[in-house]
Image: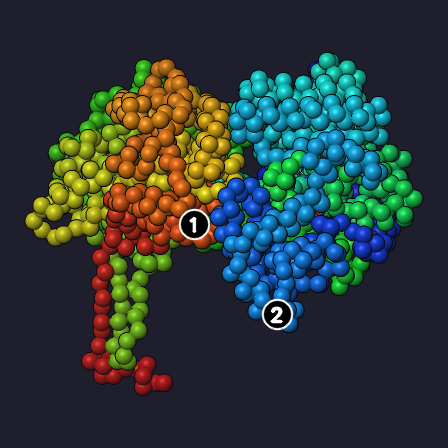
Amino acid sequence: MSTAIDWDALDAVKAQDETEAVTALLQAQPLSLEDRAAVRAEAEALVRGARRSARRQGVVENFLQEFSLSTREGLALMCLAEALLRTPDEETKDRLIAEKIGSADWASHLGKSGSLFVNASTWGLMLTGKLVDVDDEARDNLPGFLKRLAGRVGEPVIRAAVGQAIRIMGEQFVLGRTIEAAIARARAEGDICSFDMLGEGARTEADAARYEKAYAEAIETVGRLSGGQGPEAGHGVSVKLSALSPRYEATQEARVWEELYPRVKRLALIAARHDLNFTLDAEEADRLVISLKLLERLAADTDLGDWAGLGLAVQAYQKRCPQVIAGVARLARETGRRLMVRLVKGAYWDSEIKRAQVNGRAGYPVYTTKPATDLSYLVCAKALIDAAPHLYAQFATHNAHSLAAVRRMAKAAGVKIEFQRLHGMGEALYRAADDIYDGVVVRAYAPVGGHEDLLPYLVRRLLENGANTSFVHALLDERVPAETVVVDPVAAVEAVGPGPHRKIPVPIHIYGDRLNSSGVDLFVTRERERLVRAVQTLTPLTAGAAGGEPVRNPADHGQVVGRAAEASAADIDAAFAAARQAQPAWDAAGGLERARVLRAMADALEQNRDRLIAICVREAGKTLADGIAEVREAADFCRYYARLAETKFAGPEVLKGPVGETNTLELRGRGVFVCISPWNFPLAIFTGQVAAALAAGNAVLAKPAEQTPLIAAEAVRLYCAAGLPAGLLHLLPGRGETVGAALVAHAGCDGVAFTGGTETAWRINQTLAARRGPIVPFIAETGGLNGMFVDTTAQREQVIDDVILSAFGSAGQRCSALRLLFLPNDTADHLIEGLIGAMEALRLGDPADPSTDVGPVIDEDARQALADHLERLKREARVLKVLEAPAGGTFFGPVLAEVPDAGFLEREVFGPVLHIVRYDPEDLEAVAGLLASKGYGLTLGVHSRIEAFAEEVKALVPAGNVYVNRSIIGAVVGVQPFGGQGLSGTGPKAGGPEALSRYCVERAVSVNITAQGGDPALLNL
Ligand SMILES: Cc1cc2nc3c(=O)[nH]c(=O)nc-3n(C[C@H](O)[C@H](O)[C@H](O)COP(=O)(O)OP(=O)(O)OC[C@H]3O[C@@H](n4cnc5c(N)ncnc54)[C@H](O)[C@@H]3O)c2cc1C
């Protein structure tokens, strides 16, 4: 029964050109002209019918009608709903309520909605009505009353009222807290359901085991209480694979088979035993192919007998959707197992768009226009219906047009289908459909679980349905006529053309005036394989003169990556002389010409991307993902500085002044810059420093770190190939104390750009200060003692993801990495447990392996320093977790330890060691003050839903880069200009608008025009 479908082939169209994809959809002509007219008429009738019963429409719909996301109140409520119930301590709850409630105009919503519930919750949320005593003034002068109430939010009665209102809102979406309660309610309401156990994706094995247990019990209970009706007529269960494994990722394929598959199979076996519909929900586009491989294995598994209830959800907003349906239909045919397929449009559209932009993908995996998604839905619906009886089609939509179109297609084909809606939504629409069509089969997707787990789900639904593009949103707005609410996607696409949304440029064009660097999609098997091959086939490299010392792979010291020879004193003198000679012409060439060369360098970096990544992996022990980020950042620096060269160095800037004279300011290069870069960003910082100095019109002598001369040599070769004139850039490999010191002390040095340790920065500063001659600029980027402050409103899974990435990504070898995590007493234990579990899910090993999360540290000195620190932690702190380091190279297993306070660390510990400090929110000032007193100021993180908390932390701890509700690493050139203050650096920030200011000299030129007889401009006014 086994099949051999090449699911990876689907990725060829993952980021397909949108015009091409939509043109193909149009050509598919899912409906004839006649059908289109009929569908439109039916859909309008559905809208009218639904509106007629709007009194009975879902509470959620009423809610959306009143509090759309475009209002402050809608947003405030969403934030409250998401965070309030998980916040354990009353003080923080009050702050959250005060901030969100205080920022909105509730009075404007009072009494507007016809729904009792919405009104009740408005009242509740306004902290008034029956939930709180209303005095006379409230009736006479509501605004004044509310203002005063906002000041009373600390009162328990108000906290209780708001909590209650949010809970009521949430309950509309869940069918029950337990599966038994949900089944009972479904029976009472006469619904067939697909039950889903609420919750976020698993971050730990323990989470995954807990979810498996919950799903298993649910399936068993559904089977026991209402089984025997078969997968079509009876209740079913939907599962999110991300809940069943902390590492459900394409890059972790082996673990998907070892850990996730057995779990899913165990659940499928129970569902098969009860003959239920068991559907794998569709999640992020990056998980599509791995989910299909998993489905294939399940479908072909003979242990599941002839069960015909296995199913999956397929997203029509993905460009690959038609191919997915074709593949799944083939799978069903070849395995002889009928599959149930739920066609959805897709619930992650905004995050798909963001992810593609952040990762510099070639295109979006999803359509960028709503009509294209709707059209795709029709085309895919037809394909699904045509695949009967191998596939049983299920259509999840709340859109009247989609519903009417699908019904017509199925009727014409004589194929039985079912519709699906979300519990709490679409009731009025399906009631109308039931009337008009004389009965339709509808299943409700019904979340089951507690309030705390519900709220993130609720927020997704609110986001999805509160959006202006949403059908539900329009359906509710009585001011919009039914003819306008119903949109025929074929006509809509034809009206605007098949191209992408005009406000959503492809990822490389998001910056407008410069290209975004392009990435590699590691979730595509062929791209991964290509990178792995590039690493395997890398041939030995050289830096500097022939011979030299071997450069070893930190992951395998037996492997020599290449050889590097240290520059001699004569090399340094010769380089200064040649640079001095070449610089004036380069300076005179102007910003436009320099920009051209820098852009060519950016292109060259991208053209050689695979090889450069391979060198980063072998020489610096970088993972593939980090290698990709290196090349992208290097290219971004070149393009960003090219733009600065163009705008700031194209010619003199004319200044305002009196008539009769012209006043201008010109920027020129300083001369010869010395750039000293570190091993932890051996390509990005090396290339970036050089690009900045060159952009400003300087020549450069660049000294790479001792550990990473080979990638630097490659960058220099690329600069030359990109057209950089000879003599301008010299690579001087060698040790800091010899080559570095000589370069800085040299009389020919007109400025120094340095990234590295604070101690070295002090030494350089002293050397420069001791020189007799012009005082030259020193631009230093040094280390940090970076903290992240979490409060009790923060969401566990988000904190875990961001902390793990910030502390252990790149083996903690980033100056921006997280060193001190401040956790509030109330949630610390729970978060620590999650962090330990998430650490256990990390994979350490050869960075060339795409499944590796943490590679080696750079060398034995680094490893030893970390080992010494661990000894100290064992003696003086509480070590919570140490991961075992692989044998071979200089690996160091990540460490989690609890320390009493920030005073425990005097300087940064450069590696994967995270220190936790518990704090009492009352002591925030003192706790944060101790961190600030260390004098560093690089990165700072905050995880909280309370803006005022973030502001407070920001005010207490100085930092050049502050990150709220995200990781604290990975600053993007031009987007998050990077650099610290205090002991962390001098500025200006790398990748920021002022980055070139210290690489140049300014010259003000004033010309008295009247000296030659008068000012013609004035005389001709
Ligand atoms: C029973 C059920 C099960 C579900 N299971 C899943 C699941 O497993 N996985 C999943 O991802 N979702 C799932 N969903 C959610 C589903 O994707 C959304 O509810 C659905 O997209 C709403 O579609 P609609 O036809 O009701 O609404 P409409 O309002 O007609 O369509 C909304 C859709 O258009 C998309 N859209 C909006 N703007 C744009 C734009 N500019 N460009 C392109 N597309 C745009 C939205 O992302 C959304 O997909 C499920 C829904 C139901 C009812």
| Residue at (28, 76) in percent of width and height | 657
> The N terminus is located in which quarter?
top right
User: Is the C-beta of the residue carrying label 1 under 8 Å from the nearest atom of ligand 1?
Assistant: no
Number of numbered labels in the structure image: 2
Left or right relative to 626: residue 662: left
Where residue 896 sits in the image (x, y, percent)? 39, 28
Res. 282 visible in picture: no
Query: Which of 546/278 is in front?
Result: 278
Indicate the amino acid at tag 1: Ala
Where residue 357 sits in the image (x, y, percent)? 52, 44
Vertical relation: 575 (above or below) 996: above
Query: Image quadrant of residue 846?
Result: top left
| Residue at (84, 52) in percent of width and height | 46
Which residue is disc 2 drawn over?
A: 137
Circle 2: is it few (<14), some (14-19), or many (20+) Cα within 10 Å? few
Indicate the amino acid at tag 2: Glu
Where residue 61 sits in the image (x, y, percent)? 73, 52
Left or right relative to 752: residue 205: right
Query: Image quadrant of residue 685?
Result: top left
Of circles 1 and 2, the one toward us is: 2
Name the secondary structure under disc 2: helix
Separation (CA) of disc 1 from disc 2 = 36 Å
Which residue is disc 1 drawn over?
A: 950
> The C terminus is located in which quarter?
bottom left
Where residue 178 sits in the image (x, y, percent)? 70, 32
Image colouring:
rainbow
